[in-house]
Image: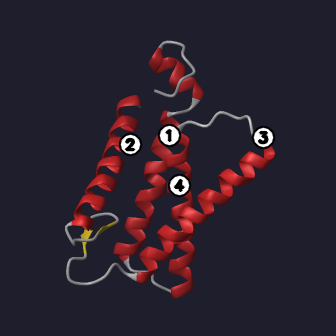
């Protein structure tokens, strides 16, 4: 499980760096591997990413208000962002009534990655794979 989590996190992180690097060269790469060099990124994809950021911000804001001393690892942020972007993306697709196979499958990849990260970063797996430490990796 640990290897799968590391692989998923590495792939998502490399994708993000690649997307930013290509953007500076004038090529837009959006989830998962759509190139938009001549056309713009579809508005519904931008809305999903924007609303995912806002929902993630709200989640951590409420978490802070509930218990400001709780330790949160970066892997938790990644998991929450993927879940919140899934929720935002689903709401955007429902609102604009866009139910194409490509859109739904690309949206379903986000919670799948979040689930792998969640299962692999649970405390009992961390202890098993790291020899008793509570540190996530």
Sequence-wise first label, 1 or 2 = 2
Q: Position of residue 125 (x, y in %)?
A: 52, 26
Quarter of the N terminus within the rendering: top left
- 127 vs 108, left or right, is right
For residue 135, above or below residue 36? above
Sequence-wise first label, 2 or 4 = 2
The residue that disc 4 covers is: 81
For residue 135, above or below residue 111? above
Where disc 2 sits, the SS reads helix
Verify CB contact (< 8 Å) between mark 3 and mark 4.
no
Closer to viewer: mark 1 or mark 3: 3
Where disc 3 sits, the SS reads loop
Sequence-wise first label, 1 or 3 = 3
Which mark is on residue 75?
A: 1
Gap between marks 3 and 4, in whole Å?
A: 20 Å
Where disc 4 sits, the SS reads helix
Closer to viewer: mark 3 or mark 4: 3
Verify CB contact (< 8 Å) between mark 1 and mark 2.
yes
Farthest-out residue, right: 66
Verify CB contact (< 8 Å) between mark 3 and mark 2.
no
The residue that disc 2 covers is: 9
Q: Position of residue 97 (x, y in %)?
A: 50, 86
Gap between marks 4 and 1, in whole Å?
A: 10 Å
Sequence-wise first label, 3 or 4 = 3
Image point (80%, 45%), residue name: 66
The residue that disc 3 covers is: 67
Sequence-wise first label, 4 or 1 = 1
Gap between marks 2 and 4, in whole Å?
A: 13 Å
Which mark is on residue 18?
A: none
Gap between marks 3 and 2, in whole Å?
A: 27 Å
Farthest-out residue, top: 131
Farthest-out residue, bottom: 96
């Amino acid at each position: 499980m640990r290897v799968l989590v590391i692989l998923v996190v590495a792939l998502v992180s490399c994708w993000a760096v690649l997307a930013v690097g290509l953007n500076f060269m004038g090529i837009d790469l959006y989830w998962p591997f759509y190139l938009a060099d001549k056309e713009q990124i579809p508005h519904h994809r931008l809305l999903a990413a924007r609303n995912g950021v806002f929902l993630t911000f709200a989640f951590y804001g409420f978490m802070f208000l509930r218990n400001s001393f709780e330790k949160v690892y970066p892997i938790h942020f990644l998991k929450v962002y993927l879940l919140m972007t899934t929720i935002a993306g689903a709401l955007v697709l429902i609102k604009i009534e866009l139910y194409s196979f490509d859109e739904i499958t690309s949206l379903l990849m986000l919670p799948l990655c979040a689930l792998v990260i969640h299962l692999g970063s649970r405390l009992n797996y961390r202890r098993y794979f790291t020899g008793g430490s509570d540190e996530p990796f």
